[in-house]
Image (cartoon, rainbow, N blue to C red):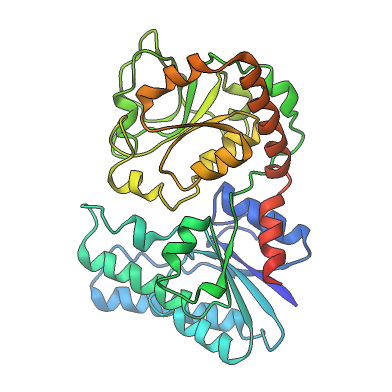
C-alpha cells in the first residue's frame, strides 16, 4: 500500500495539519492519487526550555511515538514523508533505519533544506547548525527516492546522497479551486506595478526597504515598516484565499536578501537552489514574474516564457520599457497555461508517479 505521513498538531482533530499551504497542497494531491494518510499526532514537549537531558528526552519521546505509529508498515509498503519533518528529532533516523530493514520504500518530498538555509545565519549557534545537519542528513541517507526542487538542488544534493535517488519536481504546485485565471489577468498591464507579496520584516526582506524609485511597487504582507510614496504602496496583509483577488499590477517579484542590486545573505543565497513558493503563487494567479537571474527558477521562467529575468531591481524599468504590448500579451498567455498546470497539481503528480 502507498501511505503518506500526516503530521497533526496535538489537540487538533485529524482534519487539521501542522503545515502550511505548500504542505497542505501536497497532502491534497496524495489523497487525490489514492495515497492513504498515516496520521501521527505531535508530542507535547517544549524543547526550548530545560537542560540538555530534558531536551534529549523530548527528542526520544518523538522517536518512540513514530515507532509505535509506523510499526504496522511492512514489506511492499511505500511511505511518503514531507521533509523536513515538523516534529523533528535527533533520533528519527532510527525509525527510518527500521523501516528500511522491513523493506518499506521511503520517499522524501523536500520543502526546505534547513541545514543549508540556516548555515549562514549569524543568529543560529554552531551547535544548532550541527544538530540540524545531523537530523536532516541522517534521514536522507535512508530514503529510496528524494523529490528535490530543481536541477540546481539536485546538483547540490548529489554530493550528499546517491544521485539515482533524486527526482526533480521543477516547481511547486499551488492549488486553487473555482479560480478564473482569465478574469484575474484582466487586472494586469505591461506597465503595471511589481507586486511584492510575503514576509516584509526587514530581517527577511531588507531589499524591500531600498527599492528603485523609477518604477511602481505594490507591497502585500506583514510587518512592513518602510516608506511609502508615489512609487511604493503598501496594502497590508490579506488572508491567503483573498490575496489572489486583491493584487493588481503587472508582475510578481521573486527576490530575497539584503540588496536591490543582487540577492545576497542567507535568504538571497538560498534562491540559488530553492523554489520559492511565492513564485508558484504568482504564476497560479496568472501573474508573470520578475526573478533574479541567478535564481534556480530563472531557467524555468525563461524556458516557459512566463516572466522576465533581471540582474538587479534597477533593471526592471528598462526591460519593461523595451517590451512591446504584444510581448506582454504573449507572456500572459504562457503564464495562463502555467497557471492551469499549477492549480491542478501537475508537477507534484508527475514527481510522485516517478517514485511509485
Quarter of image, res 225: top left
Identify which residue, 65 or 343, lies in the foreground.
Answer: 343
Horizontally, residue 36 falls left or right of residue 319, namely: right
Identify which residue, 1 or 65, lies in the foreground.
Answer: 1
Identify which residue, 135 or 59, lies in the foreground.
Answer: 135
Q: How many marks?
A: 0
35 w.r.t. 345: above or below: below
Q: Residue at x 40, y 49 (%)?
A: 272
Spot occupied by residue 25 in the image (x, y as percentages of width and height): 64, 51
211 w.r.t. 258: above or below: above
Image quadrant in which the C terminus is located: bottom right
**Is there any visible trace of residue 24 in the rendered image?**
yes
Horizontally, residue 4 falls left or right of residue 210, namely: right
Furthest-bottom residue in view? 101
Spot occupied by residue 339 in the image (x, y as percentages of width and height): 69, 37
Spot occupied by residue 241 in the image (x, y as percentages of width and height): 63, 34
Image quadrant in which the N terminus is located: bottom right
142 w.r.t. 224: above or below: below
Quarter of image, res 338: top right
Spot occupied by residue 36 in the image (x, y as percentages of width and height): 73, 68
**Is there any visible trace of residue 111 in the rendered image?**
no
Q: Residue at x 34, y 19 (%)?
A: 212
Horizontally, residue 33 falls left or right of residue 93, namely: right
Amino acid at each position: 500500500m502507498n501511505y503518506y505521513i500526516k503530521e497533526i498538531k496535538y489537540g487538533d482533530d485529524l482534519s487539521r495539519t501542522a503545515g502550511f499551504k505548500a504542505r497542505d497542497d501536497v497532502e491534497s494531491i496524495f489523497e487525490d492519487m489514492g495515497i492513504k494518510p498515516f496520521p501521527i499526532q505531535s508530542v507535547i514537549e517544549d524543547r526550548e526550555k530545560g537542560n540538555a537531558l530534558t531536551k534529549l528526552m523530548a527528542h526520544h519521546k518523538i522517536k518512540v511515538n513514530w515507532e509505535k505509529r509506523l510499526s504496522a508498515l511492512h514489506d511492499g509498503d511505500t511511505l511518503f514523508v514531507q521533509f523536513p519533518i515538523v516534529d523533528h528529532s535527533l533520533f528519527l533516523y532510527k525509525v527510518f533505519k527500521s523501516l528500511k530493514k522491513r523493506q518499506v520504500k521511503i520517499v522524501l518530498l523536500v520543502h526546505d533544506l534547513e541545514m543549508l538555509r540556516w548555515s549562514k545565519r549569524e543568529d543560529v549557534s554552531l551547535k544548532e547548525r550541527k544538530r540540524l545537519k545531523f537530523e536532516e542528513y541522517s534521514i536522507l541517507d535512508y530514503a529510496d527516492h528524494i523529490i528535490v526542487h530543481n536541477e540546481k538542488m539536485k546538483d547540490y544534493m548529489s554530493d550528499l546522497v546517491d544521485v539515482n535517488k533524486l527526482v526533480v519536481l521543477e516547481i511547486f504546485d499551488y492549488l486553487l479551486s473555482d479560480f478564473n485565471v482569465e478574469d484575474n489577468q484582466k487586472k494586469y498591464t505591461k506597465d503595471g506595478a511589481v507586486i511584492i507579496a510575503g514576509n516584509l520584516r526587514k530581517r527577511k526582506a531588507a531589499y524591500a526597504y531600498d527599492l528603485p524609485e523609477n518604477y511602481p511597487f505594490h507591497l502585500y504582507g506583514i510587518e512592513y515598516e518602510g516608506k511609502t510614496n508615489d512609487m511604493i504602496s503598501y496594502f497590508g496583509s490579506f488572508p491567503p484565499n483573498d490575496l489572489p483577488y486583491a493584487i493588481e499590477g503587472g508582475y510578481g517579484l521573486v527576490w530575497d536578501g539584503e540588496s536591490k542590486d543582487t540577492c545576497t545573505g542567507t535568504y538571497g543565497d538560498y534562491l540559488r537552489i530553492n523554489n520559492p513558493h511565492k513564485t508558484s503563487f504568482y504564476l497560479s494567479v496568472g501573474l508573470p514574474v520578475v526573478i533574479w537571474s541567478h535564481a534556480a527558477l530563472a531557467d524555468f521562467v525563461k524556458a516557459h516564457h512566463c516572466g522576465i529575468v533581471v540582474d538587479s531591481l534597477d533593471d526592471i524599468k528598462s526591460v519593461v520599457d523595451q517590451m512591446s504590448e504584444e510581448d506582454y500579451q504573449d507572456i500572459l498567455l504562457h503564464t495562463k497555461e502555467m497557471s492551469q498546470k499549477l492549480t491542478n497539481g501537475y508537477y507534484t503528480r508527475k514527481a510522485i508517479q516517478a517514485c511509485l
